[in-house]
Amino acid sequence: MTGKNSDSKLASLLKIGRPAQRLLASSGLVFGGFATSTVFVSLFFYVASGSVDEMALYGLGRYVGLIIISGIIVKVFPQSSPRQLFRIGLILTAAFYLLIIVLRTSAVGLVVPLGLFNGAAAGIYWFGNNTLAFDVLSPDERSHYYGLSFAIMSILNVAMPLAGGLIISRVGGELGYVCVFGVSLVSFCLAWWTSRKLQTSTGVGAVSMRHALIVPPRQRGWSFIWIAIALHGFKQGGADLGMIVLVELATHSSSDQGIYVSIASLAGVASSVIAGRLPPLVRGRTMWIGALGYGMALILLLFGANFAILLVYGLVSGFAYPGLMVSLSSVVLDVIASDPSAAQLRGEYVLSREIATNVGRIVAISLLIGLMWFLSVTASILVVLCVAAIFQLVAAFLGRHASHSLRLA
């Protein structure tokens, strides 16, 4: 009886039920693994090779791998449950970090294959995670769940990169990176262990690749959402890679990389929770505020890219952007759920979502690589970031349009 009362009190406090809490707990450990080392994997390839191109090729391979594996899952393993995919993805992600630890600097010659492998591993995990989110979360839980999820992600992105940067600085060189990757390896193994309690649901079933690739026209609002997701993916691919390079050029310090990520993430903790608790009626305005805030932060970089300015940019953009991302994530699930055939077609929607996200990322990195043939590294990054800022305004407009259409339907 006491256990039930505790569960009830926790559910009332978090405003999500037990299945959603379990998903949040397992995902939190995954976030911890990613937060510890994602920046430092890219930085490792950059520092070890001395080339932005090598780091960009790793990112490009990773996002291509994400798309390829998503297509393979729905064709080869249509009956695999989302929980199975979630756990298999974690095993393969742990294997990737074990490979990096074993190969060390020899991994630089394998940036594309390793990127493809890591992308495939992450793709399996995210396909399972996103499908589980649709299966587990009720309409009333979605905003609260994503608000808590982004808040936890932000907290971990404060603590773990800071710790990772300090480890690399104190231990030094190659061994420092190995220690950080080892922490991530342990985190993914723990996430795999805790995920055994996740809710089991049916496989995604047969998925139409044709509909997933050309954007399902039968569902009102999905075309707008697909484009919005792709534009967000562009920002992820361009900004994440670009900021690693800008901080490295400004400081040449791994600990400063951790400080930058920590400050940007700390700013997003409160705004993520607030955005998750706002009613659906104000999602449109929240998305606009998030997109405008990100654009205003970018203006700072036009005045210089020293570390102080980069920190202020991270602070402002980190606080503003959850307004767009939390609300857009909720609208995505609402649009899917509004399809009467959503339960049967959820795999198709998840595949379409993964394709959109990674197409956006690939376009951003490809643009960056192309620009570096004509412009300096810093100028190329700033151009990509400016394009990303414009795209976020378009994403906010499309997300608001989809949300408004749902209320009128």
Image (spheres, rainbow, N blue to C red):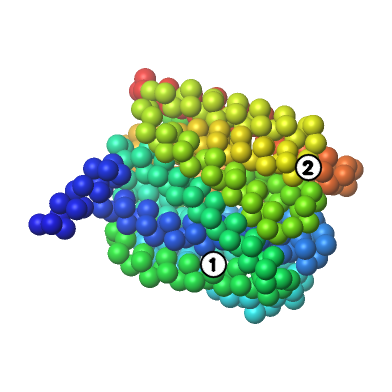
Between 211 and 96, the one nearer to me in the picture: 96
The quadrant of the image that shows the C terminus is top left
Q: Position of residue 121 (x, y in %)?
A: 54, 64
Q: Which residue is depicted at the point 54% across and 52% down? A: 157
Q: Which residue is depicted at the point 29% across and 37% down? A: 140
Q: Which residue is depicted at the point 79% across and 32% down? A: 303
Residue 128 marker: none
Residue pointed to by mark 2: 306
The amino acid beneath tag 1 is Ser
Q: Is residue 382 above or below residue 182?
A: above
Between 209 and 46, the one nearer to me in the picture: 46
The quadrant of the image that shows the N terminus is bottom left
Residue 184 marker: 1
Note whether residue 122 is visible: no
Note whether residue 93 is visible: yes
Between 257 and 50, the one nearer to me in the picture: 257
On screen, residue 145 versus residue 33, left or right, reads left
Q: Is residue 256 above or below residue 357?
A: below
